[in-house]
Amino acid sequence: MPFQLLLNILLAFLWMFLANSFSASSFIIGYLLGLIAMFAMRRGFSSRFYLGPFIALIRLVIRFLYELVVANLQVLSIILKPRLDIKPGIFAYETELEHNWQITLLSMLITLTPGTLVVDISDDNKTLYIHALHMPEADDAVASIRNSFEKAILEVSR
């Protein structure tokens, strides 16, 4: 994938030289034309087309920002209630992620979301122990993490 990105940048500079225009708009046009040309020849590359993981990364960032806003509103509603009606708890989360960087990213995303905190990771890196500020049902919390963060991380790393 880094080779494809460098090739696309090279094609953008080649376009700038051929068009005899050395501006940012000329570079962007060349980059987009190179992107189209590389997409047409994507079967000739040994690895996956580099724009796919980039789009998946953008989706992961958007999903995290959405979860961040929703979790902040939930914590705010808990704080503003006159009576604390929370059920804190720690639950075990079995992950399907295999690489250390994937598990670290998942742990960071969970910890950065208000109301949740990764307390510990098992020795085999398959179980995360997560503390939740309000957890009426552990299965719902597990399903939420699996369908949001873990799914997005798997899409980025494919």
Image (cartoon, rainbow, N blue to C red):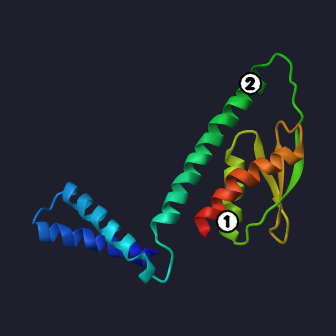
Q: Quadrant of residue 45?
A: bottom left
**Within 10 angstroms of label 1, few (less than 14), some, or many (20 or more) residues?**
some
Q: Which label is found at residue 102?
A: 1
- Taking the spot 37% from the left edge, 72% from the top edge, the residue there is 40
Q: Residue furthest top?
A: 82
Indicate the position of residue 148 as horizontal and vertical percent values: 69, 51
Q: Is residue 116 left or right of residue 102?
A: right
- Taking the spot 77% from the left edge, 44% from the top edge, the residue there is 116
Q: Secondary structure at mark 1?
A: helix
Indicate the position of residue 78 as horizontal and vertical percent values: 78, 26
**Quarter of the figure that contains the C terminus:** bottom right
- Residue bearing the label numbered 2: 77
Q: Is residue 63 left or right of residue 47?
A: right
Q: Compared with residue 153, is residue 69 higher up or lower down, i.e. above or below?
A: above
Which of the marked residues, 1 or 2, is nearer the chain's N terminus? 2
Indicate the position of residue 157 as horizontal and vertical percent values: 61, 68
